[in-house]
Amino acid sequence: MRLKLDNETHILRSILLRYATPLTTGLFIVSLVSGVALFFHFEGRLFKAMHEWLSMILAVPFGLHLWKNWRPLVSYFKRPPMTVALLASLVGALAFAVPAMLAPPGGGNPMQAVLGAVQNGTIAHLAPLFGHTPDSLAEAMRGRGLVVASSQARLGEVAEASNRTARDMLPILADLRR
């Protein structure tokens, strides 16, 4: 027995289902273009957030598209091409996931490794990178309201004593560069 839907619910359902496939198509194209741009390292600032957020939003119209086309979709699963395509997709995903899971610790994004080294460095070690002596960098940081016990303090310790995160310290250091 089907539930009787009121007119507003019927209109909303009709609109959602009418736009499910076009939205899926449009957001897929955006995801494709931004993914290709990210792959080739073209304007990462422009495409990274776009790709991540709109790809997540793509899940909603995709779900509606599946709901709208459920019966034809189920019939695809009765044919070998769907099984072959899904298995090929799984193998492709595993080709990237398994080596990453089995890799020894380390590796990863080199930028993250450098930032980690900076965040764990002492004021004395970081000072020359920013055109300072250890004492002048410590004094400049104090001038920004940070709690710096000595030039031997690690950046993470300064952040913690100043109620900030180590990541918060990076723009401050960049501003203090001579």
Image (spheres, rainbow, N blue to C red):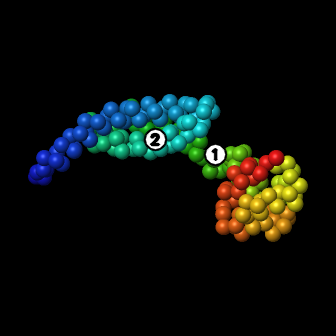
Q: Is residue 169 left or right of residue 52?
A: right
Please give the name of the residue rendered at 44% of the width and 45% of the height, measured from the top-left corner: 56
Distance, label 1 to label 2, CA atoms, is: 25 Å
Quadrant of the image occupied by residue 148: bottom right
Please give the name of the residue rendered at 76% of the width and 61% of the height, measured from the top-left corner: 143
Q: Is residue 142 left or right of residue 93?
A: right
Quadrant of the image occupied by residue 154: bottom right
Amino acid bearing label 2: Ser
Q: Which residue is mark 2?
A: 55
Compared with 1, 94 (above or below) is: above
Q: Position of residue 116 (x, y in %)?
A: 73, 54
Nearest to viewer (mark 1 / mark 2): 2
Where disc 2 sits, the SS reads: helix
Quadrant of the image occupied by residue 165: bottom right
Q: Which mark is residue 27?
A: none
Compared with 117, 90 (above or below) is: above
Instruction: Tell me if residue 25 can be seen.
Output: yes
Q: Which residue is mark 1?
A: 99
Decide which of tag 1 and tag 2 comes sooner along the chain: 2
Amino acid bearing label 1: Pro
Q: Position of residue 62 (x, y in %)?
A: 36, 40
Where disc 1 sits, the SS reads: helix
Please give the name of the residue rendered at 85% of the width and 48% of the height, measured from the top-left corner: 131
Q: Is residue 29 left or right of residue 64?
A: right
User: For this rendering, which residue is in front, 9 or 165?
Assistant: 165
Label 2, residues with CA under 10 Å away: few <14, some 14-19, many ≥20: some
Label 1, residues with CA under 10 Å away: few <14, some 14-19, many ≥20: few
Instruction: Tell me if residue 125 can be seen.
Output: no
Please give the name of the residue rendered at 50% of the width and 30% of the height, measured from the top-left corner: 33
Q: Position of residue 102 (x, y in %)?
A: 65, 50
